[in-house]
Every structure is written in structure tokens, then in C-alpha cells.
Amino acid sequence: MATTNPLQFIQQVRTEISKVVWPTRREVMLTTVMVFIMAALVAVFFALVDILIRGGLQQILTYFG
């Protein structure tokens, strides 16, 4: 493996960074809102599953208890 001169390395890094397509402010905001919505939906889903499991276990325990 060939070693690279630090100056060449910095030039290569700058070249690669210039190829990056950065998201617009609108895209970042939209993605952020979507993440919050999905997190809320997942939280509601797991809360409902938790309530159903807890209710089912209470029914079973009162039946056998």
C-alpha cells in the first residue's frame, strides 16, 4: 500500500467532500417531522400492545387465582 503525502490527502478529501450532495433545509425539516411522527406511532402501537398483554395476563391470573 502506497503512503500518501498529507497535502495530497487533504486535496483528495476536499475533492470527495465537494461530490457530496447535501440535503436542503426543506428536506431536513421534512425528514425530521417524519421521524417524529413515526416515533409517535410506534410508541402508541407498543403502548396498546402493552395494555392488551397486561389485560390478558390479569384475566388469566384472576381466573386461576
Image (cartoon, helix red, strand yellow):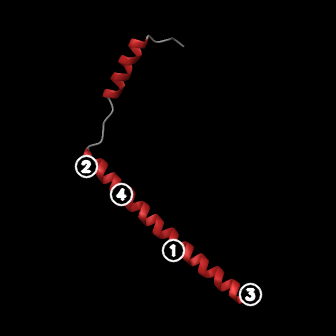
Cα distance between the residues tagged 3 and 4: 45 Å
Disc on the earlier residue, 1 or 4: 4
Assess disc 4: are there few (<14), some (14-19) or many (≥20) residues with their C-alpha within 10 Å of its C-alpha: few
Please provide percent x and percent y for residue 63. Answer: 70, 89
Disc on the earlier residue, 1 or 3: 1
Q: Quadrant of the C terminus?
A: bottom right
The amino acid type found where label 2 is placed reads: Arg
Find numbered disc 1 in the image and state the secondary structure of the residue it sits on: helix
46, above or below 4, in the image: below
- Would you identify the image quadrant in which residue 16 lies? top left
Q: Which residue is mark 4?
A: 34
24, above or below 62, in the image: above
The amino acid type found where label 1 is placed reads: Leu
Disc on the earlier residue, 4 or 2: 2
Residue 48: assigned label: 1
Cα distance between the residues tagged 2 and 3: 57 Å
Disc on the earlier residue, 2 or 1: 2
Q: Quadrant of the N terminus?
A: top right
The amino acid type found where label 4 is placed reads: Met
Q: Residue at point 28% right, 48% down?
A: 27
Q: Which residue is mark 2?
A: 26
- Would you identify the image quadrant in which residue 39 lies? bottom left
